[in-house]
Amino acid sequence: MAERSDERRIQSEIQLAASAGGGTARLWRNNVGALRDQRGQLVRYGLCPGSSDLIGLRTITITPDMVGQRVAVFSAIEVKDRGRPTDQQQAFVAMVQQAGGLAGIARSVPDALSILRL
């Protein structure tokens, strides 16, 4: 259980660091899983299997031809303390990157800030 609490701590630290200063990034916890409700119905939650622990956006100001406009770039951080990402987690990160988003595996705040280009 220590590993899970270490990952939770790192996730919280990443969320705080990403929104600090200029506040150009916002990340939210994305719990993924399933459980049975009171009637026994399976209820799935989270974006999709393999989706990252932290999802959100990074605000970027566009350069000369669109001066002053800001866009939100989808961002996804899979947080790992010691473990390895699953194939589904790696595929989700790759999909976000291929679509132009910012995504990666982070084991620390500096890793996450690097992925977010902060």
Image (cartoon, grey):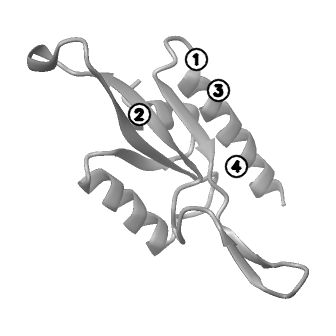
**Residue drawn at the location 48% of the way across and 65% of the way down:** 89
Could you give the CA–CA distance between mark 2 and mark 4, rounded to whole angstroms?
18 Å
Residue on which disc 4 sits: 7
- For the residue pair 58 and 89, the one nearer the viewer reads as 58
Could you give the CA–CA distance between mark 4 and mark 1, rounded to whole angstroms?
20 Å
Left or right: residue 25 compared with residue 43: left
Instruction: Tell which tag, 4 or 1, sits nearer the viewer.
Output: 1
Mark 3 Cα shell of 10 Å, populated few (<14), some (14-19), many (≥20): some
Which percent across, then down, holds residue 96?
A: 34, 54
Which percent across, then down, holds residue 53?
A: 59, 53
Whether label 1 touches label 2, CB < 8 Å? no
Q: Earlier in the sequence, mark 1 or mark 2?
A: 1
**Residue drawn at the location 62% of the way across and 53% of the way down:** 30
Mark 2 residue type: Leu
Q: Earlier in the sequence, mark 4 or mark 1?
A: 4
Which percent across, then down, holds residue 62?
A: 21, 21
Residue on which disc 2 sits: 116
